[in-house]
Image: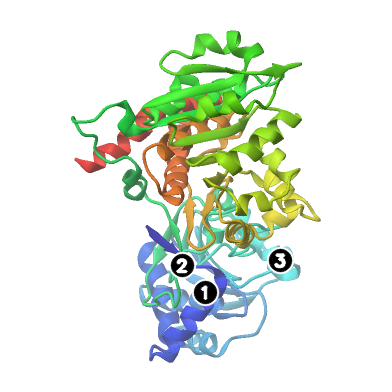
Amino acid sequence: MIPVLSVSLMRESDRHTIESGTSSRELMRRAGEGIVAAVDWIPPVAVVCGIGNNAGDGYVIAASLARMGVDCDVFLVEDRFSPDGAFYAETCRTLGVPFRMWEAGGDLTGYRTVADCIFGTGFRGEAEGPAADAIRAINESGAFVVSADINSGLNGDTGMAAVCVRSDLTAAIGGYKPGHFLGMAKDVIRRKINLDIGIEPKEKPFYLMEAADAARAFPPRLNFSNKSTYGYVALIGGSAQYTGAIRLAALANAAMRSGAGVVKVAAPACICPQIAPSILEATLFPLPDEDGAVMFDEGAMERLLHGTKAAAFGMGIGPGKGAERILAYLLAEYRGTLVIDADGLNALARSDASMLERAACRVILTPHNMEFARLLHAENGVADVIADPIPKARAYAAAHGVTVLLKGPTTVVTNGDDVLLVDRGCPGMATAGSGDVLSGVLAAICGSIDDPLLAAAAGAWVNGRAGELAEAEYGAVSMIASDTAAKLPAAIRELTDLHN
């Protein structure tokens, strides 16, 4: 796992490193020289600097390039310097590096490489004035753009911006930040690296999942095993209006392709004839229904859940009262791991959330931003979630004793203490049914391992990687959710091969 530090933790860790004996000036030198070593600088080079320590990194870059004989100009958005920045700015002047004040409407099209050193990860709000104008010029320059620490204008915790630099390479300093992954980050950062300059996290950071971490959810299988070894799971969903969701959760046996021993697909009896052709290896379990919606029947639920280790609930089940009663029953009586998705989350939002705290089962919630805003009863809706995704997901998980899997370009998975980020996935997955496939994957993994945090993160990794493989074949515009389901075996094979 790769450490990811919140902006506040990075600030505390930086301060602790300085107090422990490494000067801030030395850290600035390491950062700037590390960026220089990571890039093939094609002259002429423009280094565009703001007023803080991020600008200081730019002065180190300019001084290093001057010593290398690389033609370089420094542009100042403002004529102000931090103490350490002033030291390296003077070094630049001693070496004959030209300094120019940024002028409105400035043009950088004559430069082949541009270093973006305007704002660092501490930036908040919206870039304005000369800084916004410089960001525009960087984006229109046509040059190879290198951002120091994070793209200027991009929020270091959320990855959101009104306007920000679009980089070819972003060199994180001392550790990745959430803003390198969340929100708009994938759209404005073509490639990123981390430069270790000797700053150790002062407290437990977040972590980015890697393939080897996800592989822990798929250990080598034994010859001396059977279907019961790998778990019976139930998928509960569907309605006359939404027949596709439950089919996608089971399509190509998404759950069985992800390792479940036996899958029970439970849906309203009225749509079971439509589902049956898609259900081969799985077992079809009709549920009582009325007017195309599932009805609660305690006896039917007992029979369905008997012997299962995990269940996924909510995919296309609709807004009926029957869904709410089933949810209440599952939380009160089920003893396995329960994945709540889609209409199940909407039913939860209409119910008393304290049911989660009293739940007899382990619970994984899989909301996207809008569903999570409903769970939070957020005053400003999705905007509140986007503005603070990790703290809000972490607080909700801690308050209710659940694992939250908050879907997005990078998925946030947290149990209220640990936070795992999963950056697998692609634009082509922004299509109906992708979440239903994920629910099938999660149920399968939870059928064989008892760690909801690992199961959720590994499921998100596999689902995202399968989506990437589907997009590579069909393209972002044409791929559909069933294409992701079809690529699950290849994605899981990448993980299981790591055990060899």
The answer to which of marks 3 and 2 sits earlier in the sequence is 3
Q: Residue 189: x percent and y percent?
A: 53, 53
Which residue is labeled 1 in the image?
Answer: 9
Which residue is at the front of the view, 481 or 366?
A: 366
The quarter of the picture where the N terminus appears is bottom left
Which residue is at the front of the view, 216 or 397?
A: 397
The quarter of the picture where the C terminus appears is top left
Structural crowding at the residue carrying mark 3, measured as other residues with C-alpha within 10 Å and reported as few (<14), some (14–19) or many (≥20)? many
Which residue is at the front of the view, 169 or 68?
A: 169
Q: Is residue 79 above or below residue 373?
A: below
Q: Left of 404 or right of it: where is 18?
A: left
Structural crowding at the residue carrying mark 2, measured as other residues with C-alpha within 10 Å and reported as few (<14), some (14–19) or many (≥20)? some
Q: Residue at x 43, y 71 (%)?
A: 174
Amino acid residing under circle 3: Ala
Which residue is labeled 2 in the image?
Answer: 205
Q: Can I make out residue 52 in this image?
A: yes
